Amino acid sequence: MKKILIIFAILFPITVFGAGVQKLSTPFWQFFYKGNGQFRIQNNSLLVIDNIVDGSSNITGLALSTINTNIPNYGVEDNSPFVVWIENDNGKGRLLVKPNKKIKTVAAQSFTIVGSNSSLKKITVKVDKNALLEKSKPIGGIVANPFKSKGIFPSAVFVEGDIGALKFNCDLFGALIYAENINLLKFKNSEFASIIVGAPDKFLYDVPTGSTTNSELMAFKSGTIGKLIANRILSTIIITGGALPNCYMNEASSVFASPILAPKGNIGLLKAKEIGAWGEFEDGFWFMEDRLFVNQCSVILSSEIKKFKVKKICTQNTSVYIHGN
C-alpha cells in the first residue's frame, strides 16, 4: 500500500544505552527503543491520518501528517500532546514506555505512538499506580471519525504493519489501537476505545442497514488478533475487518449477514471479566454508530472468535453486540 509521510519535527536528543537501546523523553514520559528504525519525538503535535483514494473508491494508501497544538492536557501547563515516530522498523523493534517520575510526579501528557512503514515485535506501556491522573488512564483523549476524511488523534498506538505484543498495565480511555495484525493485546480496562486490525480497504456508499441508510462507510481488510486479554471492556469497538455501520442493535444480526458488511478476520482468544456499555438509545431502540469514538455501545465484529472466555456480558444484544462468538 502506498504511504505518504509528512513530518514537521521538533526533535529531542537521543540517548543511546547499552545493547543499542535509545532513549527519548519529555518531562512526563520516557521511551526506550531497541530496533533498526528511525526514532524521534515530535512535540506539541497531533497525528492526522488521511486516505488516498482512487476513482473506484479503493483506499490505495494512507497520508500521515501532523498539526501543531499548544493545548495542554488536563489544564496543566507545558503539557501539550506529542507524537513518537518509529519509521522503517523491520518487525524486530521493541518499545518500552514509562513515566518520567524523576521530573514529574504525575504523567498527565497525552501521546501517540506511530509505527510508519513498520512492524514492531513488542510495545509495552508500564506505569505505577500513582503516576497518572484519572487513576489509570494514560492513553486518553476523545476524538470522532478517526478514518473518515481526516482523523485527528491526541492519543493512539498506530502501526502500519503488525504488532507482536502490545501490553498496557493500565486503562485505555478514548484511545485508538490500530495495526494490520496484533498477536497479543493486553490491558486492564477500556472505555470509549477503538481497536481495529486490518488495512483500510475501500469506501462504501449508500449502504442500507435495516431501517437506516449509511451514506458513507469505510471498510477494512481482514485482520487478526491472536489474544485479547482485559479486565473490563466498556463502550469499546473491536473490529477485525469489515465495516462499522449505523444501525439499530435489534437489526444488527441481519445487517451483518449481508455479504457486503459481513465481518472479516478473527480473534483467537477473547478473555475478559466483563463486557458492558453505557448504551445509546434512539427511537425506542439501542443504536450502533459508525463514529468509533464516543460510541456508547460495545461492538465486537469478527468472523470468528475461536475461544470466548468472558465471565459477564451486560445488556447483550441491546447496547452490547458481539459477532463471531
Image (cartoon, helix red, strand yellow):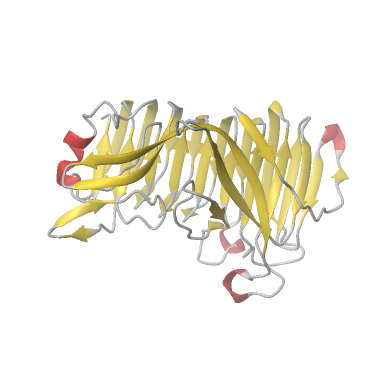
User: Which residue does the image show at 34% across and 41% down from the upper left?
Assistant: 244
Q: Is residue 186 visible?
A: yes
Quadrant the N terminus occupies: top right
User: Which residue does the image show at 24% across and 33% down from the upper left?
Assistant: 256
User: Which residue does the image show at 31% across and 26% down from the upper left?
Assistant: 303
Q: Is residue 274 visible?
A: no
Q: Relative to 97, is 104 above or below?
A: below
User: Percent x, y for residue 325?
Assistant: 26, 30
User: Which residue does the image show at 23% across and 53% down from the upper left?
Assistant: 287
Classify residue 138 by image quadrant: bottom right
Classify residue 317 by image quadrant: top left
Q: Relative to 133, is 200 above or below?
A: above
Task: Point out the residue furthest to the front here.
Answer: 55
Q: Is residue 13 left or right of residue 83?
A: right
User: Percent x, y for residue 55?
Assistant: 49, 32
Q: Is residue 315 left or right of residue 79?
A: left
Q: Relative to 69, is 201 above or below?
A: above
